[in-house]
Amino acid sequence: MPTSLPSAQRDQRDASPAAALGAALLGFFVITLDALVVNVALPAIRDDLGGGMTGLQWVVDGYTLIFAALLLSAGALSDRVGARRAFGAGLAVFVAASAACGLAPGLGLLVAARLVQGAGAAVMMPSSLALIREAYTDPLKRGRAVALWAVGGAVASAAGPVAGGAASLISWRMIFFINLPVGAVTLVLLARTARSPRRKVPLDVIGQITAVLAMGALTFAAIEASADGFTAPRVWAAVVVTAAALAAFLVSQARGRHPMVPLDLLRSRTVVISAGAGFAFMAGFYGMVFLFSLYLQQLRGLSPLATGLAFVPMTVLSAFVNPLSARAAEKFGPRVPIAFGLYLMTAGLAVLAVVPSSTPTWLLAALMLPVGLGGPLAMPPTTTLLVNSVPAERTGTASGVFNTSRQLGGALAVAVFGALVADQTHFLSGLRISLIIAALVLFAAGTAALYLKPTPAAPADRHEPVPVQPRAEPASHTHSDTTKETNPWRPGRTTS
């Protein structure tokens, strides 16, 4: 007579890697959607709730700022309580905050709800990658799973501008209610995933506080400069706070017993270049969407829906290219698609910066295509390279660092570019300067990607990765964690 299995064994038996991937994908979908869907709806929000450019910037950056600031601790939280539990908690907060955004009676409450939304998203993002890491043990399968995970962001990027424009025809509040049914489906999939292991990872309170202060003060300085100018006393005061908080953060990470960003992690060339590539991508892509959402409606008089449709060719192309990037990385190694994608975005933004103001809208949409092609070529192999370059117990921390750099890039782009286009009489010149800045950042990141370590050829009959050298105390974050990196593209070999 068969005996019943313990609950933990039943949980593992019934677990599905596909369900874990589906939950992670949908989570990434709503996170990305809410970073993009708001841009096209900004004029409608201003008409309904009031507020100038500064208020609109905070609607966008309130989400991305908290997202970026809390991602560092969220990675450690994911490791501490388990990826599945962290993801579920973050999703519940995110969905509840989405409902609050849709019901907000004023701009202040909308920004406050966006802050809570960002907190939920911060917990979801690193735990979603950790779910994939746990579900797929083979590096090649994991790379393809990460590429599919990235499709969630690509589809959200494609749907975001159009969904924002279409929803604005009814009410801008509808853009936030989209998250409710998606969140419900995600929770069902999450229930079918395996229980995640927990690790003793202390939370770094001092590091988190100083990180929030540094990022918040920097974003405040950039946004308020659009209203008061870059020489305003409170702008410079915010810059001083930024410098002091950053210095305190670095000291706490160097001397603290349990830093949330061990500085030896940043000695890995792969981690640093991956973070820089993520920052540049978000600054270029999200900055461009923010700028042209305002330009097409305020200067060209397009409706929200027509503005959203102008982004469709670029974003749809992104969705189709994403699954191909992992294959390209397997064939050519990560450096080729990463550098080529970032250079392609550089060229696209540079062309958009110099085209005459009389350029037809359909041609502007066509000129955005290199930006839509370059991003999905570069980001999936960058993400996979990062995930596979650190041992399992550091996946949440490393992905938190990576995604913090991404969100900080998007937040600073909106803040700085918004300041440059705040004066309507000089909107076009501010737009061109902003695009040139973004192109230069992407060019620098693409050049840095050329210095990623090459991947040696591997025997054809090798299919199992060499495990990371065991350590007596995996939670101590020794330097060996990052100086020996498992090669995600050629299983069975490592790079020094």
Image (cartoon, grey):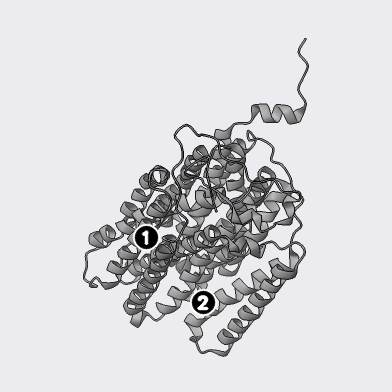
Disc 2 element: helix
Q: Which residue bears the numbered disc 2? A: 223
Q: Residue at x 58, y 82 (%)?
A: 239
Tell me the quarter of the picture where residue 302 sits.
bottom left
Question: In the image, is 128 to the left or to the right of 412?
Answer: right
Pointer 2 local density, CA inside 10 Å: few below 14, some 14–19, many at least 20:
many
Where is mark 1, residue-wise?
304
Disc on the earlier residue, 1 or 2: 2
Q: Secondary structure at mark 1?
A: helix
In the figure, residue 203 lies in which quadrant? bottom right
Question: Which residue shows up at 62% across the image and 74% down it?
Answer: 214
Q: Amino acid at mark 2?
A: Ile
- Residue 392 lies, in percent from the top left, at 64, 46
Can you say whether 168 is above or below 240 in the image? Answer: above
**Camera-nearest residue between 146 and 25:** 146
The quadrant the C terminus occupies is: bottom right
Is 82 positioned to the left or the right of 41 in the image?
A: right
Q: Nearer the viewer, residue 144 or 339?
A: 339
Q: Amino acid at mark 1?
A: Pro
What residue sits 35% from the left and 57% below the top?
340
Residue 163, can we see it? no
Pick the front one: 396 or 1:
396
* Residue 407, position as x, y percentages in the image: 53, 62
Nearer the observer: mark 1 or 2; the answer is 2
Front-most of 309 and 191?
A: 191
- Residue at horizontal 53 percent and vertical 89 percent from the top: 232
Q: Quadrant of the N terminus?
A: top right
| Residue 126 is at least partly visible in this image | yes
Q: Position of residue 81 (x, y in %)?
A: 73, 48
301 sits left or right of 111 in the view: left
